[in-house]
Image: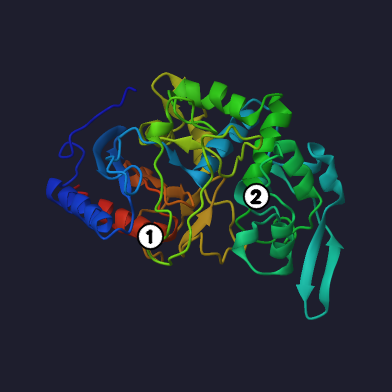
Amino acid sequence: MDIAWSSPRDAGLNPDRLAKLADTLQAQIDRRRLPGAVAMIGRRGRVAWTHVAGELVPGSGVPMREDALFRIFSMTKPIVSVAIMMLVEDFRIRLADPLERYVPEFARATVLVEDERGVREEPLARPITVQDLLRHTSGLTYDFVGTREIHRRYAQAKLHEPTQDNAEQARRLAALPLAHQPGARWEYSRSTDMLGRLVEIVSGQTLGAFLRERILEPLGMPDTAFHVAAGHEHRIADPYPIDPDSGGAVKLFDPRRVPNFESGGGGLMSTMADYTRFLRMLAGGGRLDGARLLSRDTLAFMTADHLGDIPHDAPQLPPGHGFGLGFAVRTHPGLAPLPGAVGSFFWGGIAGTTFWVDPARELFAAMMVQAPMQRDELRMLFRTMVYAALDD
């Protein structure tokens, strides 16, 4: 796959500090904190540094590959959010549209209230909108983000059942109450799974087919899909089966199986080369080479803060950040415990993958690992050392 290259020095990166970054990642591997990693830094539209280290499969002796296939989990969300905004630009869906227009079962949605008076359901003050889904203010949630009654009900609803398809999961979500009123607060959720279903309803295609036709093929991302094609299984990167910190079993989905449910919130497999092309498109204002996916203004709108005063005291959003339409967005030069300029945007996946784009520094970077419990520490390490390597 074509990659536009630059030397580290031409990109304003300090080679000695890049060597220190590589050594630090290797130290994590030597300590058995993670099996292996593929890392990338780009500036001014070009890839300036890549690093491949460790093992592809723990204990196999097989070295990590540059073309390794990773479960990117929630790094699926920005791709699906771009898909929705492409449909907005096509004027086939609007941000102000109520979700119930496309999934009528949501017209009967309620909010689960849990307070000193007990647990009860109340009617919605207003409908969920497409914008709510994009910015995670829909009132939907995940079972793993809390311990309230709503999270227990999510856990009991069999939303992970492999036999369901996207339409069935949408119906199951509509049968559950919401965690809060639409627009009332930010809560990480299955909102992007619902967006994946909206792509299907509006386009008349499966989510995978739409992504392939409108995003993955135009950008030249042949290895990104909801499962690994036959003959490529030997490229799958795996985590330690037992977490090195907690001692608990690590269970990730099997990408060899063709899923009925194509999760818009977390189902894609990808490679560093593929996702780098997606990042180059984002850093290029919606265009890569001859493929224009979004207008520059639409992408700027997506990566602006859409929360304002909406509460968002959640661990997924560090201090000094808001949320746009599919991305966390930096709103303050300080406050956060990691470096970055105002206007930078990012997201990651639960198994450890991470990326960010910093327009002010003309910087984009990503790291692919499969180390679920180590992800926060590794992300902070990588982000800090990348900024330390900037020479201009």
Q: Quadrant of residue 41?
A: top left
* Amino acid, disc 1: Pro
Whichever of labels 2 and 1 marks the residue nearer the N terminus, that label is: 2
* Amino acid, disc 2: Arg
Q: Is residue 43 left or right of residue 243?
A: left
Residue 221, labelled with which disc? none
Q: Residue furthest bottom?
A: 116
Which quadrant does the N terminus fall into?
A: top left
Q: Is residue 126 left or right of residue 155?
A: right
Between 387 and 117, the residue placed more toward the observer is 117
Q: Nearer the viewer, mark 2 or mark 1?
A: 2
Res. 284 in view: no
Reply above or below: 370 against 269.
Answer: below
Real-space Cα distance between discs 2 and 1?
30 Å
Where does residue 238 sit, x and y in percent of width and height? Answer: 41, 45
Name the residue tied to disc 2: 190
Between 318 and 53, the residue placed more toward the observer is 53
Where does residue 362 sit, x and y in percent of width and height? Answer: 32, 41
Residue 333, labelled with which disc? 1
For the point 34% across and 32% down, which residue is it? 67
Label 2 crowd bin: few (<14), some (14–19), many (20+), radius 10 Å:
many
Q: Residue furthest front?
A: 60
For the point 70% across and 54% down, which residue is it? 140
Q: Quadrant of residue 152?
A: bottom right
